[in-house]
Image (cartoon, coloured by chain):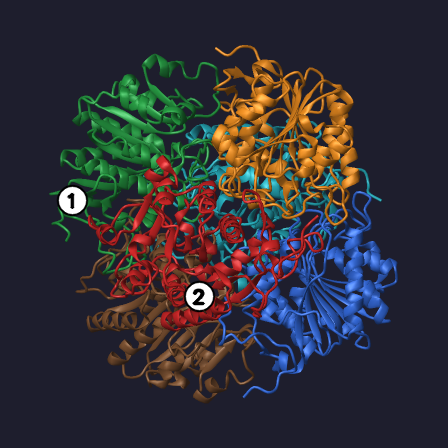
Chain colours: A green, B red, C orange, D blue, E brown, F cyan
Amino acid sequence: MSKKLAGHAPKNPLLSPRFGDIATFARLPHTRELKGVDMAVLGIPFDGGTTYRPGARFAPRAIRNASVMNRNVHPDHGVHIYEKLSVIDWGDINCNPLNLKKTFDAIEKDYGTLLKAGVLPIAMGGDHSVMYPILRAMKKKHKHFGLIQFDAHTDTADQAWGEKFHHGTPVRRLIDEKVLEGKNVFQVGIRGPLTSVDQMSWDESQGITHLGMDEFHATGMRTILAKLDTGIPYYLSFDIDGIDPAFAPGTGTPVVGGLSSYEALSCVRKLRGLKFIGFDLMEVAPMYDHAEITTMLASALIFEFMGLAAI
Amino acid sequence: MSKKLAGHAPKNPLLSPRFGDIATFARLPHTRELKGVDMAVLGIPFDGGTTYRPGARFAPRAIRNASVMNRNVHPDHGVHIYEKLSVIDWGDINCNPLNLKKTFDAIEKDYGTLLKAGVLPIAMGGDHSVMYPILRAMKKKHKHFGLIQFDAHTDTADQAWGEKFHHGTPVRRLIDEKVLEGKNVFQVGIRGPLTSVDQMSWDESQGITHLGMDEFHATGMRTILAKLDTGIPYYLSFDIDGIDPAFAPGTGTPVVGGLSSYEALSCVRKLRGLKFIGFDLMEVAPMYDHAEITTMLASALIFEFMGLAAI
Amino acid sequence: MSKKLAGHAPKNPLLSPRFGDIATFARLPHTRELKGVDMAVLGIPFDGGTTYRPGARFAPRAIRNASVMNRNVHPDHGVHIYEKLSVIDWGDINCNPLNLKKTFDAIEKDYGTLLKAGVLPIAMGGDHSVMYPILRAMKKKHKHFGLIQFDAHTDTADQAWGEKFHHGTPVRRLIDEKVLEGKNVFQVGIRGPLTSVDQMSWDESQGITHLGMDEFHATGMRTILAKLDTGIPYYLSFDIDGIDPAFAPGTGTPVVGGLSSYEALSCVRKLRGLKFIGFDLMEVAPMYDHAEITTMLASALIFEFMGLAAI
Amino acid sequence: MSKKLAGHAPKNPLLSPRFGDIATFARLPHTRELKGVDMAVLGIPFDGGTTYRPGARFAPRAIRNASVMNRNVHPDHGVHIYEKLSVIDWGDINCNPLNLKKTFDAIEKDYGTLLKAGVLPIAMGGDHSVMYPILRAMKKKHKHFGLIQFDAHTDTADQAWGEKFHHGTPVRRLIDEKVLEGKNVFQVGIRGPLTSVDQMSWDESQGITHLGMDEFHATGMRTILAKLDTGIPYYLSFDIDGIDPAFAPGTGTPVVGGLSSYEALSCVRKLRGLKFIGFDLMEVAPMYDHAEITTMLASALIFEFMGLAAI
Amino acid sequence: MSKKLAGHAPKNPLLSPRFGDIATFARLPHTRELKGVDMAVLGIPFDGGTTYRPGARFAPRAIRNASVMNRNVHPDHGVHIYEKLSVIDWGDINCNPLNLKKTFDAIEKDYGTLLKAGVLPIAMGGDHSVMYPILRAMKKKHKHFGLIQFDAHTDTADQAWGEKFHHGTPVRRLIDEKVLEGKNVFQVGIRGPLTSVDQMSWDESQGITHLGMDEFHATGMRTILAKLDTGIPYYLSFDIDGIDPAFAPGTGTPVVGGLSSYEALSCVRKLRGLKFIGFDLMEVAPMYDHAEITTMLASALIFEFMGLAAI
Amino acid sequence: MSKKLAGHAPKNPLLSPRFGDIATFARLPHTRELKGVDMAVLGIPFDGGTTYRPGARFAPRAIRNASVMNRNVHPDHGVHIYEKLSVIDWGDINCNPLNLKKTFDAIEKDYGTLLKAGVLPIAMGGDHSVMYPILRAMKKKHKHFGLIQFDAHTDTADQAWGEKFHHGTPVRRLIDEKVLEGKNVFQVGIRGPLTSVDQMSWDESQGITHLGMDEFHATGMRTILAKLDTGIPYYLSFDIDGIDPAFAPGTGTPVVGGLSSYEALSCVRKLRGLKFIGFDLMEVAPMYDHAEITTMLASALIFEFMGLAAI
């Protein structure tokens, strides 16, 4: 009944049960051979850019464990991922927990390799600081692209304790370096008290679009879908703290009042039709999770990314 | 102020505090004497049909512990359960954790006894495989009945690893054996990626009604309420994984993006007016619960079942 | 860029990280000197009035731990709390875990001192029984005031086991003693089965307004906002169990089917424009919390109270 | 092969699995009929005498849950409990969480009934304050008896915050009232820093024997066994905090550096040959337990008590 | 400084940190190519033979996660495992959670393959029932061998609920089938109450040696080391419940009063000099673990097995 | 009865219960005024030197919470700490989670201030890397001193991933810089597999004394007490992972087979009579703790340090 697979695909759960075998993402083959590969899931086990609760270095392993429950066909898009795309688990980038600079260099280099091979990368972070080297690598391949970000935070701070690089600054740095343009940055789930009255003024000056929770509850994704320039491709970055801590307790800087799991999945599905150059799922801190509810949600969101890529 | 009780009723919390005494369901009398009994809560501590996380064998005990907080009067229906019905905690069916067949036989036999005595049974599962012997027993008493099922999964798989009986197959088996007709099967909360493109085709061929989450968010229970044949009685089966893992983490095969607790309670209330021949609450796995939030919800849903039975 | 602070304000997180230093509420100065102080956060570590799960005696400490993530500016009201108000962490009232009477006397006395000094108090309970001495102290200063209460329970029981004072009776006692008038009592989030058919008749006879979950989902806060007498000031009491246990598992008598975190925050914000004479956040039981999701929500609600006070 | 049972005995685990059925202690019959009964396990769900972490009100229910793993024959004593003694689960004493006085009265009264019927009682506390009414009831029946207590604390404080009755004072009160004589009080596991230099002087003046951890590691129970007056019967009270928190985390005032589980079991076994008039297991606070390790140990200690009673 | 490796060895932690990359056992290569392989770690994710708490099906994955902290050199034996042996992670045997018979067949077959290739197998269970097919496979290769078992239970029951195969019966079945001889079976850590007075008589009649906890504390492993026939090889089976639940809470049928972690490691080391034909580590149930203390201990014990194999 | 206090002392628990008030260490006064102060407890919330599980940045706050149970008099030494010494909670050093260098500078500077004022410092780490700046500051004041370290690890690695400063290297760096001499370094609790055969050769070449677990179980602290040069003062550093994870699960790089809580406390007590220039308690990672058993033990060990300082 099933059509031919495109190449690499998950292990068949009717041959070996999902709780068995070594936990690669969705029980996909783990290989570094990129020939014929369309899409790769990879881990970035780094939390050296964390300002509150660390722990995201353990996220790739934990998301892999939960991902064994993933399936093949997206029910809304009606697409069988693995009939369309050959997908692998590439493994993890070698991060140095003691050295942000070396880690960023390794990320930028490995992304270079993946992009050069024409592979669409899906990263399991890692704290959000690693979006900086990822998008620098993207810039070398893609001239213009936008950013769609789900997050409780804007990540546009300038510094903390004199440090320019941490998980609260990547969007600022990337706009500073012209990797991104503010008008092509769309952020969903932004909420919570501010440090200063003018905290948002830089964002406004850059033309960044924030979709706060009140507006989201009033209009959903409509504002953003209307404003998006559909002529450029997008990078989709999903900080798990865009979601409410009831649904995603396993994260480092949770903010109450966020998206529900249904809303999160539904928002991503609505991006159907855009062209994507990469995806990531960031800031899962598994030691704060319970019964894998956060990692299962992370894994389901990555499946949504695959759906967007496969249609 | 209170009218006369119908018979068996919970221990008075003003005589002995709710945290005290032996934990029967809602602190109801535990007896096997069925004379004069209208309704019985019973446990089916079996998880031998589980394909992912086992543990539901401990559900009856855990739900009983949480149920001591249950009260008497349904606030919407305005009915005092125990003025209308004499209710007992029957105890547990003797399940054999190593033998699905013997367990199914025991269930079918015990249900036979309960039904013969005219007792309305409310089961605390157990994994969902046990719906198979329950409904077989029902069929011996009730010629025609439908199934209203809350669940993330359709439970219409044909087999796994060559096994025809597990918690993913009871609806298929029951339709195969003509215990159920597909057109009288209504499933709420179905969601999540599929294994194959044609996974739903058998269900469609049988006329099973699925209410997915998008449709639920658009129209609530309306579609189902409109389609239900009100001329037949129904069995109501509630797999706790119909609810989102944020509200019900304590289960074996959670699927993100499900019902909230309010939505779940509210959906059950909307079934008011139908005639029910039995109820169950399945798939609670207490070792994955936190602070009893799943078991309290399970217990509250059972109270809703009692409300439907008492009006 | 920042204007002049009004007086006491939180420690600067760019000088010392939020995870560092001794955990006062929001890292505010801890002092008992009330001169020039506009508002004080204080703890009432008492759970001697608890009828089910005790543990709220540990709430003030746990909420302080989570509150270090609080910030300065309310994003909707556009107000910098600490430019408007000088705020302190007053510490805890000396509660006697073995003696409810002595504890109530201590609370009433300490509130007298705070109110005499013109300080707006925000209490971190403690079980809800302590609202009784708080409002008695309020009554000595404020002739007329109403109560806006978020709660799953009405707290209008007459007694339990012959005891007139516990966390289920404060509203009854306060109306009995004419501290409150029923028509000025507004309760949001009331839900769950009842003990008797006429459980709500006393409340109705007193003119208390209940906003149940069905009405809330239909009309939000509109009914209450329309009925409120804006000519009198209000005391706002937030029992964390007004919120669903998925969002606030850390509490003693949770009731499923409650408010989401977004709904809770949003409801409080809608009270903007009323005059408040005091606030409290009650019934957090941290040993039932997970990953601080309850205490972070409690802390965010207290920030909302500060917002209402500062505009 | 098995001899005749003495009367009431646990449900047979080969007929219904241990995880099934309503959780009475060791799956013993629950009855209040005392005729022919030799020994009764009963719960005292009270924590109103707690000075630090409350929660012991939930201990009886939690210990019952863990106790379903208990068996019949003591391996060292070579005795089949239920061939020697008819044992029941009597249920719980009605405690008033808001009123220590009324609770003490209820305990004293119920113990009077049990003792009058010639039943040997084994209590599952509750906080240690309830030893006071228990031993007062004992005194009415038994003229002379000693106390063997396992505990991190001496429970000989005079008061706290002006309160004479709490879980730190029962031994003092009982000696004050001549229920106990200090020379017949033997305490094992006493440890930890003191409040004042002369904290132990009252104990010494009364002739109480303390077995601290250094002496225990040097000589085991020898000192105590040598000093015990074997001409009088004993009451054995086991505060679970006598054991190290690694083995018994689920308690309210843990003290590090305590007995291991093996040492605790072994110490109790060494009391073989003494005559006992009653037993208790106190201060389990299940919300601080993990994976039932504390309640399983509590349940195993109660089995040891049964062994001492049956030989 | 390091000598030449024997073949397959763990990933270098100085190239990629231990928290990174896909979690194979000890970050060893995962392959099914057996040529040149000396030893293989493999998973048996099966808990269909469990009589109390299931969950061991998740053990292999959880032990792999913890095992990334394993190192290379045994400090007492002074041996670098991987300079002596080429070791792989073979992955998991395909177990059928619904069918014990098919699972046993798969295990026996896969062990046949491994043994035929001359590979020394180390199994991560799985419940203890799977020792039955393992040793049946062993018997086909090795004419005579003994069993050294660490366990709280003897696993010599005859049946439960009429079932001959479950985790309490493998030793009985293996002796029945002449795979083992009782005189060559040595069990360490046996403890806890018995079901019947004559529970141990079959074991005694077979000549099985039990080392209980009292004897262990008196003489350590001496009795066993003296009785062992050093002329035959041994299979070493370690049920994690041989260890006290304080050190190993993550298991299905814990028994208090067991070995400490130091004692467990030390006992295994003392077996140095014997010849081993296989090893296993059974009955880890990770959902009952805390902070990986059980899985880290399991992983350390497997390292001890490797040490015994490499010297 | 109590003699005059030496100066600053804990809040009286009979005036305000231990669970109340803001959690400073042992409820000591929090001040930075050093005049008349003998000893200060301070926090170093830094985990930027962690190679496996981070989280120790939250240790000072968590240890403070547990420390409210601390008392005044050391039962073995018979000394009332606060009659001998004026003690404060100094608060935390401003650590920069993103910059190890700046953090080390801040630590060295703040220690300089404390030492200059003649205050004996007790640090709550933080990961063990911070011992490096602490001892550098010590060296400026004290010409010769030794190190007594409780730890599972030697902390004498040369580097990891090219980084010279992390929690595995401080002892190496301090010997390299002549702050310490190997012959004056004594390490208790060292255990676990090694990375290479010659891992210990540098330590041996420096004359460092390791007390492994086998030797500890054979002879206790005797070897070390015999070798210590009593003519020099010592710095005592206690890495909580010297203790077994059953007793101290809340740490980042646990090693099974370690000290029990009793052994740990007892070892520290045996150092009585030595002169100490400072103490620390390192590597508590509270998110891995359960029911505060690790932080209570940490707090009890700090009380032992106070005992050593006060006699």
| Residue where numbered disc 1 is placed | A86
Of tags 1 and 2, which is closer to the observer? 1
Residue C276 sits in quarter: top right
Q: Nearer the viewer, residue E285 or E204?
A: E285
Mark 1 crowdedness (10 Å alpha carbons): few <14, some 14-19, many ≥20: many
Q: Nearer the viewer, residue E308 or D30?
A: D30
- Above or below, A163 against D55 in this view is above
> Which amino acid type is marked by label 1?
Ser
Residue A128 sits in quarter: top left
Residue E74 sits in quarter: bottom left
> Is C51 left, or right, of C77 in this rendering?
right
Which percent across, then down, holds residue A57? 37, 41
Mark 2 crowdedness (10 Å alpha carbons): few <14, some 14-19, many ≥20: many
Which percent across, then down, holds residue D58? 63, 55
Q: Residue at x 34, y 50 (%)?
A: B186
Q: Residue at x 22, y 49 (%)?
A: A30
| Residue where numbered disc 2 is placed | E240
Q: Nearer the viewer, residue E289 or F35?
A: E289
- Above or below, D41 against C279 in this view is below
Is the same chain shared between marks 1 and 2? no
Give the spatial CA distance, label 1 vs label 2. 41 Å
Secondary structure under tag 2 reads helix
Residue F139 visible at all: no
Q: What chain letter is assigned to the residue under label 1?
A: A
Secondary structure under tag 1 reads loop
Which percent across, then down, holds residue C243? 54, 37
Which percent across, then down, holds residue B8? 62, 61
> Is F67 left, or right, of F9 in this rendering?
left
Residue E220 visible at all: yes
Pick the quarter of the image with the C terminus of chain C: top right
> Which amino acid type is marked by label 2?
Ile
Q: What chain letter is assigned to the residue under label 2?
A: E
